[in-house]
Amino acid sequence: MQRIFTDFDGPIMDVSERYYQVYQHCLHQVQEVGQALTVLSKADFWRLKRAQIPERQIGQFSGLHDDQARYFARLRRDTVHSVPYLVHDQVLPGAIAALEHLQRLGYELVVVTMRRTQTLNQALNQHNLERFFAPDHRYALPDDYRKEADIIEKPRLIGQALADLSPAQTTWMIGDTEADMAAAHAYDIPVIAVLSGIRDRERLLSCNPTWVTPDLYEAVNVILDKTPAEGTAGK
């Protein structure tokens, strides 16, 4: 049996519009009367996000003074994962075709995400993605859980999944952040970093992924190329 752990946002879901909408909302929330602001284009904003430019600095680039930029950063963190903005997420091109191909080949698919359980299940249902991930193959944060840093939480979730699930012949990880890379490295799982998410190539390469691909579809091609067919391992 061959298993793939995948993050949700980044490999499967495009969150760029959500993040951009929240950026604009928070910018105007802290804007003073008569203050001129420079609203970044979506392309410029997303380039800064993927390069991990701090929120406060993004606020300053947009014309906020120091106190405003600090408030902007806090407001952004409190808003970006809120339910009203999740409607802006969309399935990435090629993601469904990739998941369908893996499912046809008999791969065990496991989603491991920093989303809360409720918002993960809502998104799976909304986009007809629940067919790829059985309820006991969904690892997310409890709805009322006080989260620590992603780089701590993601390895915990992978460890929980490995303890719960039966052993696999081969296991892969697909993700788009340093937390995904750290989780895979913690358990000696080969990891493919995809460039369709919230980190750029430079940031991902610094985390030593096994491979880097443009998206989930190409990640699947790598896995199929590198994984022995059932029954051939050790021959």
Image: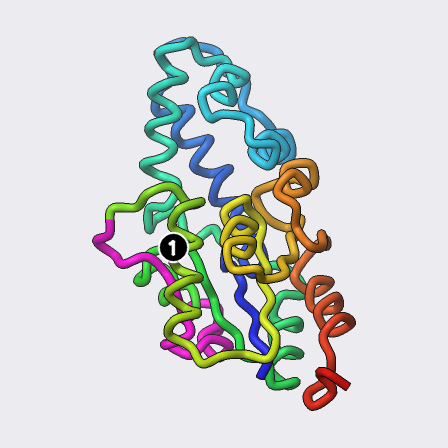
Decide if residue 235 is on the left or right side of residue 163: right
How far across and down, in percent of the image, does residue 234 sit?
A: 73, 83
- Seen from this angle, which residue lies furthest left? 144
Residue assigned mark 1: 115
Q: Which residue is drawn at 55% across and 31% down?
A: 52
Q: Which residue is drawn at 41% across and 62% down?
A: 159
Confirm whether the magenta stretch covers residue 141.
yes
137 relative to 151, above or below: below
Decide if residue 216 is on the left or right side of residue 122: right
Q: Which of 209 and 217 is in front in this view?
A: 209
Hey, what amino acid is under mark 1?
A: Arg
How far across and down, in percent of the image, does residue 35 sit?
A: 43, 10
Q: Residue at x 33, y 51 (%)?
A: 83
Q: For mark 1, does the 10 Å Cα neighbourhood hold few (<14), some (14 to 19), or many (20 or more) residues?
A: some
Q: Which of 36 and 129 is in front in this view?
A: 129
How far across and down, in percent of the image, does residue 220 sit?
A: 69, 68
Q: In which quarter of the image is residue 56?
A: top left
112 relative to 232, above or below: above
Q: Residue at x 54, y 23 (%)?
A: 39
How far across and down, in percent of the image, does residue 151 sit?
A: 44, 45
Confirm whether the magenta stretch covers residue 134.
yes
Magenta segment: 126-145
In the rendered view of the protein, which quadrant contains the N terminus?
bottom right
Q: In which quarter of the image is residue 126?
A: bottom left
In the rendered view of the protein, which quadrant contains the C terminus?
bottom right
Mark 1 secondary-structure assignment: strand
Decide if residue 2 is on the left or right side of residue 64: right
